[in-house]
């Protein structure tokens, strides 16, 4: 027992010495917090758009034919659903720019809403327009750049605009209005100087790219960042590293998603957006440049039950309870963890079992989601399971249902079921060991109570 305690302390000490400082430092970076919170602003729109995209790509040919052939004034129901998808999910880049600038400015105690509006204006300034021909040409904006394809520039614009805005305000370089002026009007005048500087700056960037013939700033940045970032989030190797780090941070009580996913989520969302466009064009395949690793890949196939794929753990607890082989602690914990776990809420498991700092469970906690990633990646790579369509299911959507929704295929649900069985198998030997320890402790306590009662 002493040897086990020494190893536990050694492992915990190693993690606390080398990983805790990194997590704390990353958690303190305002730009990472801004990216995380800013992209979260767009999630309601992403989910709404995903719902209508699921309907448009529902795997029942009679239903999709009905949507395409039912028209009102030459506009089909399918076209209306596509318009809703583009008008919600398709604005990811714009909304991301607003949310990131808003969050960044608020962290410096300045007017986030004004910073966000300026960032949106800057996004439109730097994005190339499209024109129709004819005697009265019309100007418009391509959905490609407004959506996931524009997210990189949206992040940069949000961070730059938020930082410059707060710098001007905190340096008191602004137009001040009398105190009698309503706050809404006063804030709009305060934003005038930093807003003018930011918008003109991005206008100069657009002019530079236009005059130099470099093309779209979006395409240039995508080309520059795509290769190094693909090594992180668009390859199975980089994804496995991200999963392992996520589990390790969770193990020491730090929300792994807040640390790791802040870096990787933009990549996964961009990949999901690319798959969405290919789905709409009926070209969703690896040969057409579709991606295996996307946000739904991670949320719905890797992290079933939450960080560490703990649905396998809580189902293992349920199995022990049903077999009447569980400790009293696990019997009490089972109903408190299984129901939330089905909906991917695992805080009761993380801190109630607990998983945090429990060296008995650290190996399966790291291993299970990594195995999920490998089985899912391999199944999609081999064509056994369709790629994710770009639709985003809410993170609380239970497995089996979510697998069908994000792939528009029963094969997605079957793969989730297989992954869950594998996860239970990974967790069960370690859970049995933990259960045995708890039973020994409980028997010891019972013996002490019995001895005390005799006295």
Image (tube, rainbow, N blue to C red):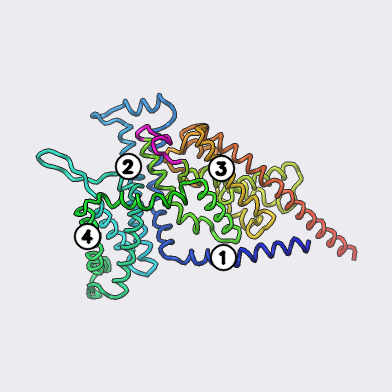
Residue 289 on the magenta span: yes
Q: Which of label 1 and label 2 is nearer to you?
A: 1
Mark 4 surroundings: few (<14), some (14-19) or many (≥20) residues within 10 A: some
Q: Residue at label 1?
A: 20
Give the image location of residue 90, x and y in percent: 33, 45
Q: In the figure, is residue 388 to the left or right of 241?
A: left
Which sits in the foreground, 323 or 313?
A: 313
Mark 3 surroundings: few (<14), some (14-19) or many (≥20) residues within 10 A: some
Q: Which residues are magenta?
A: 280-291
Q: In the figure, is residue 176 to the left or right of 297?
A: left
Q: Is residue 421 above or below residue 191?
A: above
Q: Residue at label 3?
A: 374
Q: Which of label 4 and label 1 is nearer to you?
A: 4
**Measured Cα–Cα span from mark 1 to mark 2:** 41 Å
Residue under the image location 52 percent in, 48 percent down: 237
- Going from the N terminus, do you reach mark 3 or mark 4 first? 4
Give the image location of residue 37, x and y in percent: 42, 58
- Quarter of the picture containing the N terminus is bottom right
Q: Is residue 112 above or below residue 439?
A: below
Mark 2 surroundings: few (<14), some (14-19) or many (≥20) residues within 10 A: many
Which sits in the foreground, 78 or 260?
A: 260
Q: Residue at label 2?
A: 86
- Going from the N terminus, do you reach mark 4 or mark 1 first? 1
Mark 1 surroundings: few (<14), some (14-19) or many (≥20) residues within 10 A: some
Helix, strand or loop at mark 2: helix
- Going from the N terminus, do you reach mark 3 or mark 1 first? 1
**Measured Cα–Cα span from mark 3 to mark 4:** 46 Å
């Amino acid at each position: 027992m002493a040897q086990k305690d020494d190893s536990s302390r050694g492992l915990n000490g190693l993690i606390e010495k080398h990983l805790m400082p990194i997590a704390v430092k990353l958690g303190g970076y305002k730009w990472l917090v801004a990216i995380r919170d800013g992209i979260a602003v767009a999630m309601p729109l992403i989910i709404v758009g995903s719902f209508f995209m699921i309907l448009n790509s529902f795997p029942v040919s009679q239903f999709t034919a009905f949507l395409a052939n039912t028209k009102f004034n030459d506009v089909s129901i399918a076209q209306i659903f596509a318009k809703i998808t583009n008008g919600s999910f398709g604005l990811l880049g714009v909304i991301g720019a607003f949310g990131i600038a808003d969050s960044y400015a608020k962290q410096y105690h300045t007017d986030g809403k004004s910073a966000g509006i300026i960032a949106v204006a800057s996004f439109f300034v730097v994005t190339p327009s499209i024109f129709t021909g004819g005697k009265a040409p019309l100007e418009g904006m391509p959905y490609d750049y407004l959506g996931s394809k524009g997210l990189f520039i949206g992040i940069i614009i949000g961070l730059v605009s938020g930082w410059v805005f707060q710098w001007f305000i905190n340096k008191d370089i602004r137009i001040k209005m009398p105190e009698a002026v309503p706050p809404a009007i006063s804030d709009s005048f305060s934003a005038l100087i930093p807003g003018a500087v930011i918008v003109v700056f991005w206008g100069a960037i657009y002019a530079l790219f236009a005059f130099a013939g470099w093309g779209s700033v979006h395409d240039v940045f995508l080309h520059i960042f795509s290769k190094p970032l693909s090594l992180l989030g668009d390859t199975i190797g980089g994804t496995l590293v991200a999963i392992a780090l996520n589990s390790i941070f969770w193990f020491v009580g730090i929300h792994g998603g807040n640390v790791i996913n802040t870096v990787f989520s933009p990549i996964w969302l961009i990949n999901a957006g690319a798959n969405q466009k290919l789905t709409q064009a009926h070209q969703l395949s690896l040969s057409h440049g579709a991606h295996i690793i996307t946000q739904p890949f991670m949320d719905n196939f890797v992290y079933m039950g939450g960080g560490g794929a703990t649905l396998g753990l809580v189902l293992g607890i349920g199995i022990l309870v049903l077999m009447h082989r569980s400790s009293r602690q696990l019997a009490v914990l089972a109903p408190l963890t299984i129901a939330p776990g089905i909906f991917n809420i695992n805080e009761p498991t993380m801190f109630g079992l607990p998983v945090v700092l429990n060296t008995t469970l650290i190996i399966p906690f790291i291993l299970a989601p990594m195995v999920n990633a490998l089985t899912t990646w391999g199944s999609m790579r081999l064509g056994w399971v369709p790629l994710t369509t770009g639709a985003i299911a809410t993170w609380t959507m239970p497995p089996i249902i979510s697998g069908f929704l994000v792939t528009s295929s029963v094969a997605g649900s079957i793969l989730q079921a297989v992954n869950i069985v594998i996860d239970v198998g990974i967790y069960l030997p370690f859970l049995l060991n933990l259960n045995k320890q708890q039973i020994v402790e409980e028997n010891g306590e019972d013996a002490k109570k019995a001895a005390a009662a005799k006295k």
